[in-house]
Amino acid sequence: MSWKQAFSSSVGKKIQMSLTGIFLILFLIVHCYINAQIWFGEDAFLTAAHFMGTNVIIRTIEIGLFAFLILHIVQGLSLWAKNSKRRNTRYAVKAGSQTSPWYRRSMGLLGTLILLFLIIHLSKFWGPNRFAQTFGSGELNLYELMKEEFQNMVIVVIYLLGCIALAWHLVHGVYSSMQTLGLTTHRYKTMIKNVGVAFSIIVTVIFALMPISFYMHWVN
C-alpha cells in the first residue's frame, strides 16, 4: 500500500482509524486515572492534574494527541459518509438491525455527540487552564472549577450524554480496531469482544461519576 493509498483508500482510512483509536484508548486510561483522584481528595487530584499539565513529555504527547484526535474524527466522518452513501445507493429498503447493531450504523452520530462533548470540555476546563498557564498567573484550581461548573444541570446532562455516546462508540470501536489490525483470531475473538465491552463500561462509569459526584456533593 502506497502512502497515498494509506490516506485516501477505505482500507487505509480504516487502519488510520484503528491506530489513532488505540492511541486515544490509552489516553482514556490515563484520563480515567486522573478523574478517579477526585475520590481521594482535592490534593490528590490537583497533584495528578499538575503533573499532566506541567510535565514536558506529557505536554509534547498532548500535541500528538490532538493531531490523532482530529485525524480520527475526520477519517471517521469520511468513512461514515461514504458508507451511508453506499447503503442508500444499494438498498431501497434498509434491513436495520437485522444486518448490524444500531451503534455500528450510527458511529458518525455518536462521534459527533462525542465531539460536541469534547468542545464543551475543552472550553470549560482544558482551554482556560492552558491559557492561564501560558498567559496568566499560573494554572487554575481545576477541582474548584469543576465544583462550580458541575452545579449546572445542563453541563452535567451534556457530560452524561457524551459518556453514553462514548460507551457505544467504544463497544464497537475497541473490537473494530483489533479486527482491522488482524488481531481478532478465532481463538481470541470472544475475549477481545468481552474486554471491549468491559472497558467501555468501566470508562463510562468513571467519566459519568465525576460530574454526578460534584453535582450530588458526594465529594467536597
Image (tube, helix red, strand yellow):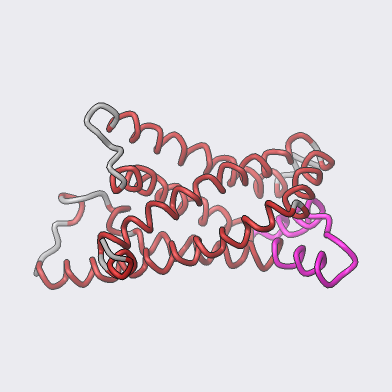
Q: Does 70 lie within the magenta span?
A: no
Camera-nearest residue between 164 and 188: 188
Q: What span is colored magenta in the figure?
A: 126-153
What is the chief secondary structure element of the magenta stretch? Answer: helix
Residue at image point 33% right, 29% down? 191
Where, quadrant-wise, is the N terminus in this rendering? Answer: bottom left
Where, quadrant-wise, is the C terminus in this rendering? Answer: top right
Rendered view: 195 above or below 163: above
Q: Residue furthest top?
A: 187
Q: Is 153 placed left or right of 74 in the picture?
A: right
Image coords of residue 24 (percent x, y): 50, 51
Image coords of residue 6 (percent x, y): 31, 64
Image coords of residue 66 (percent x, y): 56, 63
Rendered view: 164 above or below 125: above
Q: Quadrant of residue 157?
A: bottom right
Q: Residue furthest front?
A: 2
Q: Is 86 placed left or right of 36 in the picture?
A: left
Camera-nearest residue between 6 and 154: 6
Q: Is 71 placed left or right of 40 in the picture?
A: left
Q: Quadrant of residue 74?
A: bottom left
How many numbered tags mark residues here? 0
Residue at image point 42% right, 47% down? 170
Residue at image point 29% right, 53% down? 104
